[in-house]
Amino acid sequence: MEVIRDVAYLRDGNPRHRLDIYRPAKRSGSLPIVLYMHGGGFNLLSKNTHWLMGLAFARAGYLVFNVDYRLAPEHPYPAAVSDICSALEWVSEHAEAHGGDLSRLVFAGESAGGNLATALTICCCYRRPEPFAQRAFATGLVPTAVAPACAPLQITNPGRLNRKRKLPRWVNDILEGMNELYVGALHQHAPGELDLADPLHVFERRERPDRALPAFFVPIGTRDPLLDDTRRRDRALKARGVECEARYDEGELHAFHALVWRR
């Protein structure tokens, strides 16, 4: 592998506005691209904790941009979405110089990163009022595929998940804390203002996108407390004719796919 670390996608001196680049050392021609967004409940972890994901995709033949973004509670919603949109702008301008093919672009991430990958897709396919979303739309890029694994897709109203099946108290505390840290300051909000925190609502409203939505691959374990969000997205996308391959891995827990040493 070749690894280039700490490339600034915004030149404001913020260490969170950096990404790492992974690519095969031996390659011929341009490579398909993965823009990867780490998980961590919007308030933990980084591209450095998720170096293994960048390595795994690069070993599969991708050019990987593994992105950092600002974290809550110091930087609540929509700071993370804004940062990911800025990273996409940078990728649109620099990917080809690093050997990437922008016509073969994947947005990927797990958990909170899966939420952000979904929100970024919405910014690319719908004309939205947020300035950062408008800049993402202006790149003209739409991913070929989106791979948001085990994603929370409705950060608000975390209690909905406990109504489907009884969750342990500590799991409820994590879900409630994610809501409070990420969007808790927005108790009074305009209609649609939380769409990019609750991207599931966009799909369920069946609003017509300005650009066709890409295909989705959405893996999740059947013991993941976020299972119902994936099922709802699967139904909503298929109802509007969008290709969605949902993989439900029996008995697996949250983010099991990240344990790459397992078969």
Image (cartoon, rainbow, N blue to C red):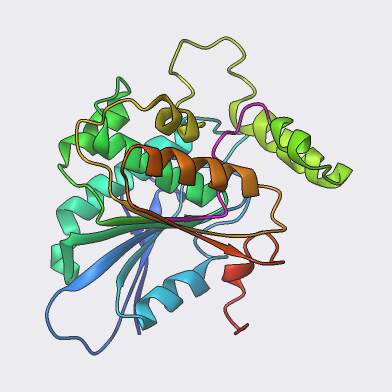
Q: Residue furthest right?
A: 169
Tell me residue 105's x, y (percent): 25, 59
The residue at 36%/28% (across/down) is: 206
One can see residue 11 in this view: no
Q: Nearer the viewer, residue 27 or 111?
A: 111
Look at the image and give the residue range highlighted in magenta.
147-157
Establish if 140 lies above or below 224: above
Q: Nearer the viewer, residue 230 or 76?
A: 230
When asked about the image quadrant of residue 217, the answer is bottom left
Q: Which quadrant, please, contains the C terminus? A: bottom right
The residue at 61%/52% (across/down) is: 40
Q: Nearer the viewer, residue 117 or 38?
A: 117
Tell me residue 118's x, y (percent): 41, 44
One can see residue 134 in this view: yes
247 relative position to 167: left or right = left
When asked about the image quadrant of residue 173, the answer is top right
Tell me residue 128's x, y (percent): 29, 24
Q: Which quadrant, please, contains the N terminus? A: bottom left
Establish if 256 lies above or below 223: below
Whether the magenta-drawn stretch holds residue 154 is answered as: yes
The residue at 41%/29% (across/down) is: 202
63 relative position to 59: left or right = left
6 relative position to 210: left or right = right
Whether the magenta-drawn stretch holds residue 234 is answered as: no
Q: Nearer the viewer, residue 160 or 8?
A: 160
The residue at 31%/31% (across/down) is: 132
Tell me residue 12's x, y (percent): 35, 41
Establish if 30 lies above or below 42: below
- Count numbered badges in the picture: 0
Q: Residue furthest bottom?
A: 26
State whether the magenta stretch is mostly helix, strand or loop.
Answer: loop
